[in-house]
Image (spheres, rainbow, N blue to C red):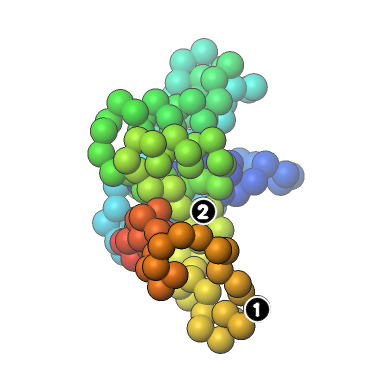
Amino acid sequence: MIIDGYNVIGTSHRNLEKQRGMLIDSLIEYGKKKGHEMTVVFDGWKTGEAQESRSITGGVKVIFSRVGEKADSVIKRIISSERREWIVVTSDRDIADHAWASGSVPVPSDDFLRVIEGNSSPFIAEEDEEDFQEPRRKGNPRKLSRKEKALKRALSKL
């Protein structure tokens, strides 16, 4: 599992270091329960070091991109270099498109946060579907698309 760190926590916090720590602590606790191999990637492109920094904290691999390189590039590089079905936690469209093209499944940050916080399933509840209208598309309307199936499968693993 690869997590786009700042995409999950946002960047508009007074104490960004504290927010990163809280995310990593949550991932450590979640990892203990589920046993997933997790890598969280943060931007270091403005204030980072000349080299990409990697460390392991409580079983979670933490990567800061080097100065001049965004976390997006690091995530794409990992997905491309290690060809396997990754679960990529991000709401960034560019990374999500790259994940789909590489055979991985992007999971929206909001859905992942709900899962690790222990809230209910990120799917729409049956009662809430009254106002929801499915977009018109070809094919069997009762059948999920290939991407919807992959996302549902990935979320069930979380």
Check the image and report above or below for 157 versus 17.
below
Quick one: which residue is furthest to the top in this view?
50
Q: Residue at x 32, y 40 (%)?
A: 103
Q: Amino acid at mark 2?
A: Pro
Q: Residue 75, how many percent across, how many down?
A: 44, 32
Which residue position holds label 2? Answer: 108
Q: Residue at x 57, y 64 (%)?
A: 135
Check the image and report above or below for 119 versus 144.
below
Check the image and report above or below for 68 versus 158.
above
Q: Residue 6, how many percent across, how many down?
A: 58, 41
Would residue 135 be visible to someone looking at this image? yes
Q: Residues within 10 Å of mark 1 (few under 14, many from 20)?
A: few
Which residue position holds label 1? Answer: 131
Q: Nearer the viewer, residue 71 or 144?
A: 144
Q: Quadrant of the C terminus?
A: bottom left
Q: Nearer the viewer, residue 124 or 55?
A: 124
